[in-house]
Structure formats: structure tokens, C-alpha cells
Amino acid sequence: MSNIKNFINGNFQNPINNNWIDNYNPSNGDVYGQIPNSSSEDVEEAFEAAKSAFSQWSQTTLEERSRILIRISELLEENLQRFAEAESIDNGKPLSLAKTVDIPRAASNFRFFGNAITQFASESHESVGQNAINYTLRQPIGVVGCISPWNLPLYLFTWKIAPALATGNCVVAKPSEVTPMTAYMLGEICNEAGLPSGVLNIVHGLGSSTGQAIIEHPGIKAISFTGGTATGAHIAKVAAPMFKKLSLELGGKNPNIIFADCDYDHMLATTVRSSFANQGQICLCGSRIFIEASIYDKFKADFIDKVKQLNVGHPSEKSTDIGALVSKPHLEKVKSYIEIAKAEGANILYGGKEVTVEGFEDGYYLQPTVIEVHNDECRVNQEEIFGPVVTLMPFTTEEEVLTMANKVKYGLSATLWTNNLTRTMKFSSKLEAGIVWVNTWMMRDLRTPFGGVKASGVGREGGFEALRFFTEPKNICIKY
Ligand code: NDP
């Protein structure tokens, strides 16, 4: 058994109430460990530790903060194999993906914000003719809360924690209860890197109790949250009367728009990835594929041919393209959408069935699933499924596809495939999304703003946007 503990004030400790939750291995359905079912008392202890650490950490020089964050990054890289294996076991994702994407990216997050903080500057405004100068002080907020989901566990956890720490805040953080392992392991690395006790505190448990205690805590002045839209709406409601600063990165139902004039082979290979990477459990996956009618039949045949070649298997196998879904309830939710599609009269062109992997019969495996829909307003085209399921639909005009692309409640990302510059400019400006990729997908530069519009969230992460979020600007006006 692989039990994990809370990380409070630099120590690993059991939950005060001694309540525990089972941790499942999605590849075989076994319980392989237990995690604390922390209560508000644990959150209070974490808060007190963070509060005590704040006065010193907020005054630590930028060079020193930067050095510690970069050391954390190096230690993650040195422990890449161990972290990648833990992530793959906890989440069900292919080990190859955890090794090439999740853990390297977590390390990059610490390195990036460790460097960015040394370049972060504030403005000054000279009030010409009035003998006065204004300058902006950007001060850390104090104790902040970071809450992250299960799909890219350490990657998204550190995407919040690194800028929060870089700007001099102290943190109370909670990873998803479904994938807590690498967050637990991060505590050891932080101690080894010399992060002072109490600066980062990691409390494990259920969203409805442990997470709720974080968002309700009056001393936690800002919440950076990534997760589902319903949870985001709940957090906004709880936080608003306390005037907490909020960054909400929520769900998506992203369009992937394919015009006949695109670079076809590159588009096809990328579309397979943008549909099914991480079992389709990435908020940026292009789950609604719109194809220009003149290439629809060709695309359909070629795409299904490629999807058939994807290997669903145990996450640790090198040949595996698609691992296990994260949990049994999530598998059931995704399967329920396949039934909804059938009831709505859509065609299941490929997939739709559970896969039995020999030796791991109780794991949560599902075929990559391609659904042809006849109406863009059907539920499978409107609601976030967050699994290996995409819909296909043809279009004939630019106006038609633009309308369909924007006709969802979400607005996280959009992908456009075309070599027409005028069309590129028109769609880039008119697509309702926080991120538009043209002739590529999920190409990330950590300096760029990241986030969504509409029900996909409020606020932006990434680069100086994240450093601005985690600081409070104060204007100082000096008359001389
Ligand atoms: P949830 O919203 O269920 O959970 C996210 C986190 O919030 C978890 O740590 C969860 O804990 C916690 N939580 C749940 N309820 C509360 C509460 N009342 N108070 C405080 N915290 C709470 O999302 P999932 O984990 O299911 O993640 C999938 C969702 O995340 C999808 O909708 C996906 O689109 C979105 N997402 C968005 C991204 C973006 O950048 N926009 C990126 C990645 C994912 P617990 O797990 O214990 O319930």
C-alpha cells in the first residue's frame, strides 16, 4: 500500500480526524493506497503555517526565491522516472506521456516562474507639470489557495503554485483527490530544495470538504482554481461575499475547424492527437470537429483509419497510445454520453465500447470514439464529455462554421486549419475563445496568456498575467 500524508509546515502528517479515502489504480481497478480525508482543522493548521511563514518569505530576495524554484525544477528533472511512474499509476495515462509531457512541464513551470520573477517590473507614471510621480508597488497577496484537477495532475498543480511562490505568497494547495500522488511527492522535493517550512502546504481530501474549507477560509485571500465549470461557479459564489481574488480555469468544448486548403497530412496527424491525447481528458482537446464538405468523406475515412490504429492498453506499455480513464465514475459518465448520442440519432462511426486489457480486466479502458452528428445543437456536441470521444460534422460556408463554433456555452480554445491568410485573420478575431491555434494544436509558450471566455472561466494564467494575479497593485503618488 502506498499511503500519502498532508504536507504542513514542512512536515508529513496524518489528518487530524484520522479519516482516509481509498486511492484507486485506474489501470486495474485496485485500491493501492489511502489518502487523508482532511477536515477544516487540517486546512486551519495549513493556513496558520502559511501565515507564519509569510512575513519572511515575502521579504526573501528575488534571487533567493528564484534559486529555490529553479532547484525544485532541477530535482523534478532528476526524479523524472519516479514521478512519471507515479503519475501514470495514479491517473491511468500512458507512462510515455507522463515522461515527455506532464513531469517535464511541471519542472518547466518552476524554472519559468523562477526566471520570470527576476524580470517582473512595475510601472511608474510621471504627472507632468504637477511635480508628482506615481509608481505601482506589486505586493504579494498573503496566503493563497491553489486547487487543481486530475487530468494533468502535477502539471496544473505547479502551474499555479510556482507563480504564487515566485511572487512571495504562501500557499495552501489541494490536488484532486483522485490523483494526489505526485503532489504528495512534491513536498519532499520542496524540502530538499530548501523551500522554508510553511511556505507551501499541501492538504489532501475531498473537494466538498477539504476544498470547501479552503475556499471558505476568510484568511485565504485569493483562489486559483482549475476544474469543472459547475465547481467554478460554486467557488465564485462562496468567494464573492469575501471579495477574494479569483482565477477560474474551467471546462471546454473546443471546435477544430478544418478547411480543404489546409496541409492535410499535418492536420490529420494533429487532429488524432488533439482528439485523443491523454484519453481525451485535456480541457484543450478539440472535441467538435467541423470539416469543409468538399473533403468530408475523405477526412472521415482517413481519420477513422488512423483512429483504428491507436492502441488502447496498459499505461506502462511502450506501445500504448490510449491508457485508462481516470476513474470508474468518469468512465461511466463518458459511456453515458455514447448512449445519449445513440438516443439522439447520431452515428457511432468507430469505438464506443469498453476495452478489456488482458491481465487488467478491471481497468477503466474505452475505445477512442468517433461520432457523426447531424445537428450541432445535440447534447454530445454541446456538453463537455472530457473523454476519448469526438464528433464530426460537415460545413459549407465560413459563416455557417463560425456560428456553429461559437454556439456553445464554453470558450476555452479553438483550432483552425487553413492556409488562407484572410480567413485566418477573420476567424482568429471572431472565434469566442481564450486561445486560437492556427495550423497547430497545444503549442505552448509559457509567456502567453492562458484561459477562457464565457463558461470556460475568468482571468488568465501564464507569464506575467499569473504574476499580476498573485500580486496586489498599489499606487504610490509622491508630490515633490
Ligand atoms: P472538479 O471541478 O470536479 O474538481 C477540480 C478540483 O476542485 C478538485 O481538486 C476537486 O476536488 C476540487 N473541488 C471540488 N469541489 C470543490 C469545492 N466545493 N470547493 C473547493 N474545491 C472543490 O473538476 P475535475 O477534477 O473533474 O476536472 C475536470 C474538469 O477540469 C473538466 O471540466 C476540465 O475541462 C477542467 N479543466 C480545465 C482546464 C483549464 O485550464 N481551463 C484544464 C484542465 C481541466 P476533488 O477531486 O476531491 O473533488
Image: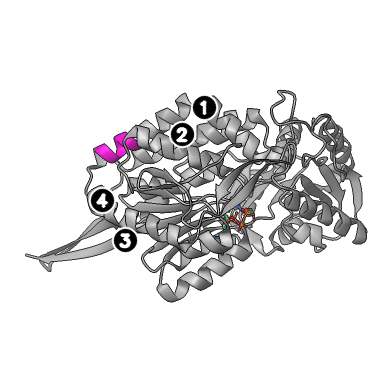
Which disc is residue 80 wearing? 1
**231 and 310: which one is in front?**
231
Label 1 vs 2, first from the N-terminus = 1
In this rendering, the label closer to the viewer, 4 or 3 = 4
Instruction: Determine whether the residue tagged by mark 1 lies in a helix, strand or loop.
Output: helix
Residue plotted at (81% across, 47% down): 292
Query: Which mark identifies residue 107?
Result: 2
Q: Quadrant of residue 209?
A: bottom right
Which quadrant of the figure shows ligand 1? bottom right
Count residues near mark 4 (Cα–Cα under 10 Å), then give few for <14, some for 14-19, many for 20+: many
Tag 1: amino acid: Leu
Q: Furthest-front residue in view? A: 18
Earlier residue among tags 3 and 2:
2
Query: Mark 4 or mark 2, which has the lower sequence index?
Result: 4
Query: Judging from the image, what secondary structure is the residue with disc 2 in?
Result: helix
Instruction: Choose mark 3 or mark 2, whichever is in front.
Output: 2
Q: CA distance from mark 4 to mark 2?
A: 23 Å
- Residue flagged by tag 2: what amino acid is it? Ala
Q: Which residue, given by chain and number where applicable, does mark 3 sit on? A: 472
Mark 3 or mark 4, which is nearer the start of the sequence?
4
In the figure, is residue 194 to the left or right of 153?
A: left
- Residue 154, image x and y in percent? 53, 41
Residue range (magenta): 64-70
* Disc nearest the viewer among 1 and 2: 1
